[in-house]
Image (cartoon, rainbow, N blue to C red):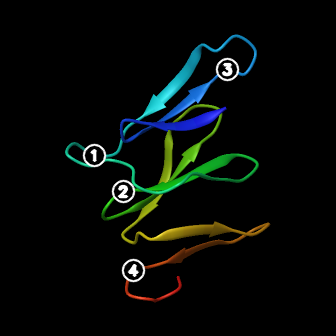
Amino acid sequence: VYAREFGRLVAIDALDGSERWRWMPPIGRFLETEIALSENLAFVADSLDTYAIDLDSGELVWSTPARGQLSLTRDTLFIARDDGVLM
């Protein structure tokens, strides 16, 4: 189970409810979007950047300097920025 908690991404074990890992964006930032999940990554965004987080380890895989509404197809992440640009 993956959830946003106080601006952070948290992975919770579905069987016993224990926390598996917690990921936080850079200091002073908080996650603002819903979580988009692929088979192995969670995609989240703060006020400036979008991040891909490994579902097993909770480690940052990559980030990009864009934020907005996230939409995921089978193999593509789309970011609909606030200015209307689709990335």
| Of labels 1 and 4, the one closer to you | 4
Residue type, numbered disc 1: Pro
Inter-mark Cα distance, 1 to 4: 21 Å
Residue furthest to the left in view is: 28
Give how far across and how far down residue 42 sits, in percent: 60, 48
Tell me whether circle 4 and circle 3 mark residues in contact (CB < 8 Å). Answer: no
For residue 67, above or below residue 36 = below
Q: Quadrant of residue 74?
A: bottom right
| Of labels 4 and 3, the one closer to you | 4
Tell me whether circle 1 and circle 2 mark residues in contact (CB < 8 Å). Answer: yes
Q: Earlier in the sequence, mark 1 or mark 3?
A: 3
Q: Residue tagged by mark 1? A: 26
User: Image point 36% across, 56% down: which residue?
Assistant: 46
For residue 65, above or below residue 46 = below
43 or 4: nearer the viewer: 4
Residue 35 is left or right of residue 5, and the answer is right
Inter-mark Cα distance, 1 to 3: 25 Å
Pointer 4: residues within 10 angstroms few (<14), some, or many (20+)? few
User: Image point 28% across, 46% down: which residue?
Assistant: 26
Q: Which mark is residue 46?
A: 2
Pointer 3: residues within 10 angstroms few (<14), some, or many (20+)? few
Q: Secondary structure at mark 2?
A: loop
Q: Residue tagged by mark 3? A: 13
Inter-mark Cα distance, 4 to 3: 34 Å
Give how far across and how far down residue 14 sits, in percent: 72, 22
User: Image point 36% across, 36% down: which residue?
Assistant: 6
| Of labels 1 and 2, the one closer to you | 2
Q: Residue tagged by mark 4? A: 82
Inter-mark Cα distance, 4 to 2: 13 Å
